[in-house]
Amino acid sequence: MFGKAGLGGLMQQAQKMQENMKKAQAELAVTEVSGEAGNGLVKVVMTCGHQIRSIDISPELIAEAAEDKEMLEVLVLAAVIGVSSWWFAAGRFTETPAMAGMSQADAIGAAQRADLTVNVEQQYSDDVAAGVVISTDPTAGTRVERRAQIDTVVSAGPQTYAMPNVVGLPQDAASSALVGAHLAVGSVTGEYSDTVDSGRVVSAGAEAGSQVVHDTAVDLVVSMGPAPVAVTDCTGRSAADARSTLEAAGFTVTTEEKPSADVEAGKVISQDPASGQLQAGSEIHLVVSSGAEQVAVPDVRARTTADARSTLEAAGFTVEQKYVDESASTHLDRVQRTDPVRGTRLAKGSTVTIYVI
């Protein structure tokens, strides 16, 4: 609770206090008080332990006592009674000194000077520094008998608890561990990390195992996973170049082919996403051109010119018309053949020539 060093210090203070109390009791036992009778003709010195140390009788009284022994006895008895009466009426009492706010050592010294003993009790306090007296019982100024015990409450400082090891724990588990250790969760900040999984604690504001004052708010740094990577737009590049660039940045690349009349075969038509930032390992999809769409030239032989043109244009071709015999004065308006011939696969938009007879 106090740690090895703190407990050792308390034991030393307790031993010193016991030694001081024994010393005070010994000093009190030999402390001398005096009394007199007959205007000083008889003087008696006694200890607070009720031992008579000396009786001083004036020579004049001794001479007179030869004729009046009883008077001498009365005066001696009066002196003894006077000393004892003072002790029992007032001399055996003292006042509790004002010890609150003193250090423990100073408080014990003040009690000893007042012929009192001290019983020390440690108590946690958030307001009073460790080693300083919080309160006494009886309180300051109370009339008590000499050698009475004063119960003294001394601050042990604020109560502390061992900091749990929360590094590597999920944020919720780390928060629960702090609350269970009589601590609180302070500010929580995110930090990119290549080594700690997202959502787990990277570091804490107190070292694991250290003693932390109760209810202290401990700050946490929580992983957001690896830092995001900027996405390079590879639209228009060759598929091989785009894949190499994106995979080198840590992304996963998927592709599909689509025909395009505008983008050369083997080059990237579009990319998703094409910009922004992504976590390493994220997927980027590429649409790669397979070139213009290929369609077969339909068979329009023996059809009218208009019918053949309509069929070819519907298939995506541009139509050019020629006559088989340009010199003939009349024509049958029937298609003899096409160039390229029927069944040939061409890109949409290609030109197909029809030959009319």
Image (cartoon, rainbow, N blue to C red):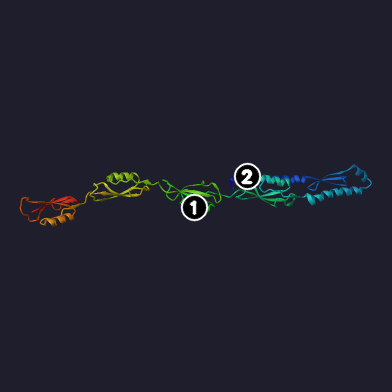
Picture quarter with the C terminus: bottom left
Q: Disc 2 residue type? A: Gly
Mark 2 Cα within 10 Å, few/some/many (few <14, many 20+)?
Answer: few
Q: Can residue 78 be seen?
A: yes
User: Quarter-wise, where is residue 240 in the image?
Assistant: top left
- Of 141 and 107, nearer the camera is 141
Label 1 vs label 2: CA separation?
A: 34 Å
Residue 260 image position (x, y, % from top left): 24, 50
Q: Earlier in the sequence, mark 1 or mark 2?
A: 2
Q: Tag 2, which secondary structure?
A: helix
* Residue shown at the point (17%, 54%) measured from the top left: 313
* Residue shown at the point (75%, 49%) measured from the top left: 94
Residue 198 image position (x, y, % from top left): 42, 50
* Residue shown at the point (48%, 51%) measured from the top left: 174
Q: Disc 1 residue type? A: Ser
Residue 9 — which label? 2
Q: Tag 1, which secondary structure?
A: helix
Residue 265 — which label? none
Q: Are marks 1 and 2 in contact (CB under 8 Å)?
A: no
- Of 161 and 297, nearer the camera is 297
Task: Provide the residue designation for mark 1.
Answer: 175
Q: Can residue 21 be seen?
A: no
